[in-house]
Amino acid sequence: MPVPHFSQNQPAAQLTARRRWLQGVSVACAAAAFGSGLFAPTVASEARFTPIVRAIEAARPSVVNIHGRKTVRAENASFGSDGGVKQVNGMGTGIVFDPRGYILTNYHVVEGVSNIQVTLHNDRHVVARLIAHDPKTDLAVIKIDSEAPLKVVQFGTSCDLRTAEEVVAMGNAYGYEYTVTRGIISALHRTVQVSDEQKYQDLIQTDASINPGNSGGPLFNIDGDVIGINVAVRVGAQGIGFAIPIDEALDVAARLMSIERLEQQSHGIVGKTKCEPTQRTFVVSSVRRESPGERADLQPGDIITSIAGRKVERALDVELALLGRRKTEDLNVEVIRGGNSVTTNLVLAPATKNTGKVALADRVWENLGLRLAPMEDQEFKLLNSRYRGGLAVQAVRPDSPAAAQGIRRGDVLVGMHVWETVSLDNVSYVLDREDANRQEPVLFYILRGSDTLYGHLRLAERPR
């Protein structure tokens, strides 16, 4: 539209005409701008609130941001030198899995942090305490105190993931709280070595941007269900991040939340989470002798569906349902046995000293034919091994898988499958893994004198 020209000494009538022309142009421009969307309507359109937007907004209260300072050794500093350590700021993310304030995160986020600062979605700042951790899987449980129950994140499953399906990561990226990034699953079952001490197995690879501070945060599917715990990025690469599958992470969380570990209470139930795309079930594999589970007449093959009114789908649900219960409390347990619903009652008992260790030792004896004992650090160092620790073989059962492989008394078991065996819990972890069951026989490593030997153990038949 041409603009009329007016000289400096123009008559009043011409000035009035110019003002009217400019007003008209302003109205026309405003109308055009509104029509083009430059001026958005005050009410957002329904199309903007996609299912994934709604899901992420709903999940936000279940995600927390973690900050803390830790002392680390400076690069190139020798032991005993001045200035050999420095203070660094750490940051990460966590997810609430129990309304009482229990939060799952990566162990490296809180390792060495004496004052774990947690920020909730409403900007409330609280101090958390470390409850339990597993350095091998790099997972930890922390707890905050809250007067009101916290909202719990919605868990999905990682058993049905597909390459190229869309995912969303949320976390405290570089300190920018509740950063949301979107991408796809690039690959599954990745093995990632991030340091001499830390090696991750069976990770989800994604191109959703994962940055420092995302560690411990959720990886969602497009339904808003958590399908992984963000754990690592590939340094120097773009669009290569990794997450721990949620089914594995929650199995580790179940062990970390064991009431025997936290409250010295015993239930005697040994079982596994069976994960399927449409449902998760907790199946009893065995019941310890003279335990509350045996007195409640629980049997191998039972599917526990609820305890004290709490729905049970995973091993973690069992521990959370029993956590904080009184020793004399009569707890209603509902199970499915042979397709029929059965109800029984469970009363917890104090865990006798070494109850868990004895039961675990018996299990290793039954499955492998080995009687194992942890070695003291100083004793193990005398072996001059590159391994961090091992289990001394005290006895070998005749006609057992171990005996068939020639393992002897005096050998030191240092690894099974792809994991080190520093403690009996490490051996139990291997025995509990579904992939270890599928990949029998299991690779093992032993130290014998100055030699490192390996072989394959075909595990004993287990109760179904």
Image: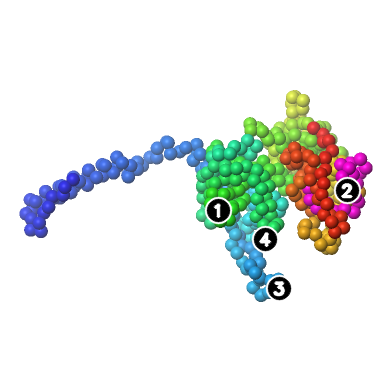
Instruction: Tell me the amino acid under the disc marked 3.
Output: Gly
Q: Which residues are magenta?
A: 396-416
Residue sitting nearer the eye, 203 or 275:
203
Q: Which mark is residue 237?
A: 1
Give the CA distance from mark 4 to mark 3.
19 Å
Q: Tell me residue 26's x, y (percent).
A: 22, 47
What residue sits right under mark 3 in the picture? 80
Mark pair 2, 4: CA separation: 38 Å
Q: Residue reaching furthest bottom?
A: 82
Say whether residue 255 is left or right of residue 157: right
Residue ID at (63%, 56%): 109
Residue type highlighted by circle 1: Ala
Q: Amino acid at mark 4?
A: Gly
Characterize the local packing of mark 3: few (<14), some (14-19) or many (20 or more) Cα atoms within 10 angstroms: few
Real-space Cα separation, disc 2 to disc 1, in angstroms: 44 Å
Q: Between disc 1 and disc 4, whose residue precedes?
A: 4
Task: Tell me: residue 444, above or below residue 312.
Answer: below
Q: Amino acid at mark 2?
A: Ile
Q: Position of residue 306 (x, y in %)?
A: 71, 34
Q: Is residue 160 visible?
A: yes
